[in-house]
């Protein structure tokens, strides 16, 4: 029997969306502002299309103005940059998100840095990364996935993580690095691990807060987890399983859930954990942009 609390990201995200919906009504009534979110997707990757549709649906349920720009996979870089320039200048658009990954012929860095920082609701612009890293968090857009993880960690442990060891497995610009900045700002002692880290299981076992963001299905086993730890599973891996002779796809995280749940105090499931919280934080960032 797993003893850990299952952290319900889906339910928490729904509560956040409900609260945003109320704030949007007030913003419309008092200032005549409707938050606007523009999502740009290039190409036809099925997983990306699922995420983008989720984002659009949630934005509409929050009362936002939501526009989806679907570009062909062979769209030229200058055409993408022209669209972003148009959205940068559109007063009805408060947030711009370009879905990653982009097709190989496009320069992701050039594209993400072309979004004006005050509409960069993904928090990928260097100005927002700089503010976050320098501790000017209130004036930054914080990347949505680590922001969502942080809210779930706060629910478990409070806002001051003094004396606690946080271990992040994964060093991406989108998750690992901003997650480290947020945990550090909350006074945790932070270790970032990656594929070149020696004796990873041993390092992980020191974690009071373990964040898994590697993109390898169920890599983190039960015996990597310190008893009583809070485990945040950022991984979203589609794996093939065979049930009754039929091939199916199943979603799984970077953590072997059942094993870890026997040791941890609390753990996020996949699906229904970090994913929905990521979308909720995108809505929160867009509302913040429209309000300021
Ligand atoms: N510019 C940009 N910003 C992003 O924030 C961004 C991105 N590009 N590219 C891809 C990743 C991934 N991502 C997810 C968001 C929600 C779920 C989500 O809602 N997941 C559901 C399950 C959805 C399913 O069935 O696939 C869940 O975990 O419960 C997953 C993944 C945002 N990303
Ligand atoms: Mg994000």
Image (cartoon, rainbow, N blue to C red):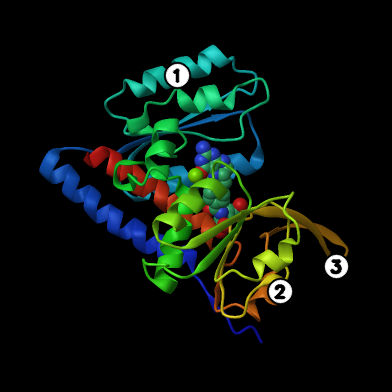
Residue at the far right in the pictured view = 245
What's the residue at 55%, 41% (across, down)? 173
Q: Counting other residues with Cα less than 10 Å from the Cα at mark 2, is it few (<14), some (14-19), or many (20 or more)? A: many
The residue indicated by pointer 3 is 244
Which label's residue is closer to the chain start, 2 or 1? 1
Secondary structure beneath dot 2 equals helix
Q: Mark 2 near ligand 1 (CB under 8 Å)?
A: no
Q: Is mark 3 on a helix, strand or loop?
A: loop
Labels 3 & 1 near each other (Cβ < 8 A): no
> Is residue 52 in sight in this rendering?
no
Which of the two residues, 48 or 1, is positioned nearer the viewer here? 1
> Where does the image place residue 166, in percent across and percent down from the top left?
54, 63
Q: What residue is disc 2 on?
A: 222
Q: Tell which of 232 and 86 is nearer to you.
A: 232
Residue beneath the point at 74% across and 49% down:
196
The disc placed on residue 74 is none
């Amino acid at each position: 029997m797993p003893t850990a609390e299952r952290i319900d990201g889906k339910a928490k995200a729904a509560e956040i969306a409900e609260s945003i919906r109320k704030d949007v009504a007030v913003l419309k009534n008092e200032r005549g502002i409707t938050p606007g979110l523009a999502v740009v997707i290039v190409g036809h990757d099925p997983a990306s299309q699922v995420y983008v549709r989720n984002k659009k649906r949630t934005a509409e349920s929050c009362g936002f103005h939501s526009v989806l720009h679907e570009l062909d996979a062979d769209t030229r870089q200058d055409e993408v940059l022209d669209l972003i320039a148009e959205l940068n200048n559109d007063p009805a658009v408060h947030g711009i998100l370009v879905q990653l990954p982009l097709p190989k012929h496009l320069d992701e860095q050039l594209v993400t840095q072309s979004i004006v920082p005050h509409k960069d609701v993904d928090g990928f612009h260097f100005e927002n990364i700089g503010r976050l890293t320098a501790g000017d968090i209130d004036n930054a857009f914080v990347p949505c996935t680590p922001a969502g993880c942080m809210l779930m960690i706060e629910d478990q442990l409070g806002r001051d993580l003094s004396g606690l060891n946080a271990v992040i497995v994964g060093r991406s610009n989108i998750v690992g690095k901003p997650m480290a900045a947020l945990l550090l700002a909350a006074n945790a002692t932070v270790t970032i691990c990656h594929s070149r880290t020696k004796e990873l299981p041993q390092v992980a076992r020191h974690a009071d807060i373990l964040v898994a963001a590697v993109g390898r299905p169920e890599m983190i086993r039960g015996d990597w987890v310190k008893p009583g730890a809070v485990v945040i599973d950022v991984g979203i891996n589609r794996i093939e399983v065979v049930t009754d002779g039929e091939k199916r796809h199943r979603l799984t995280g970077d953590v072997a859930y059942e094993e870890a749940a026997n040791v941890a105090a609390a753990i996020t499931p996949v699906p229904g954990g970090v994913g929905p919280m990521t979308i909720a934080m995108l809505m929160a960032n867009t509302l913040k942009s429209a309000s300021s």
